[in-house]
Image: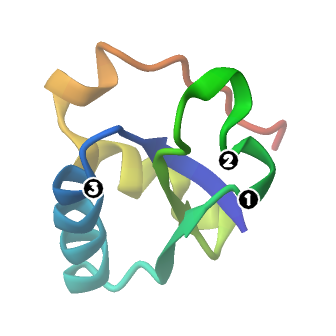
């Protein structure tokens, strides 16, 4: 599993999960229990994809507006 996206807006995370699921990319939404209450900030939902090989397709589905706010680190081939 690889974390792909996180947002303070749970609706955005759920919407993207639906898009990935409809594209055949297995994924799930998680909340990091370690981050709970750190610095008084509640944890944000995180979208994780199951297969590393789906990263590029998933990033395309994120759309340019979300990608512009992200730092993307791809694994070595």
Q: Which element is circle 1 on?
A: helix
Badge 3 element: helix
On the image, which quarter does residue 2 sit in? bottom right
Residue matched to label 3 = 10
Secondary structure found at label 2: loop
**Mark 2 crowdedness (10 Å alpha carbons): few <14, some 14-19, many ≥20:** few
Query: Is 25 placed left or right of 9 in the picture?
Result: right
Residue 72 spot, x, y in % from top left: 56, 25
Could you give the CA–CA distance between mark 1 and mark 2, rounded to whole angstroms?
Answer: 5 Å
Choose between 76 and 25: the one closer to the eye. Answer: 25
Residue of label 1: 33
Residue 13 position, x and y percent, is 29, 56
Where residue 62 appears, as percent x and y from the top left, is 26, 44
Q: Is residue 10 above or below residue 35?
A: below
Q: Which residue is mark 2?
A: 36
Question: In the image, is 42 to the left or to the right of 50?
Answer: left
Q: Are marks 1 and 2 in contact (CB under 8 Å)?
A: yes
Locate the C terminus by quadrant: top right
Q: Residue at x 27, y 55 (%)?
A: 10
Above/below status of 19 relative to 56: below
Between marks 2 and 3, how big is the CA–CA gap? 15 Å
What's the residue at 63%, 76% (across, down)?
A: 50
Dot 2 or dot 3, earlier in sequence: 3
Give the quadrant of residue 6.
top left
């Amino acid at each position: 599993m690889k974390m792909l996206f996180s947002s303070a807006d749970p609706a955005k995370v759920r919407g993207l999960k639906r898009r990935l699921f409809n594209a055949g990319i297995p994924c799930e939404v998680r909340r990091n229990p370690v981050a709970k209450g750190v610095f008084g900030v509640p944890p944000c939902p995180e979208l994780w994809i199951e297969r590393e090989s789906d990263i590029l397709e998933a990033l395309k589905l994120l759309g340019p507006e979300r990608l512009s706010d992200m730092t993307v680190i791809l694994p070595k081939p």
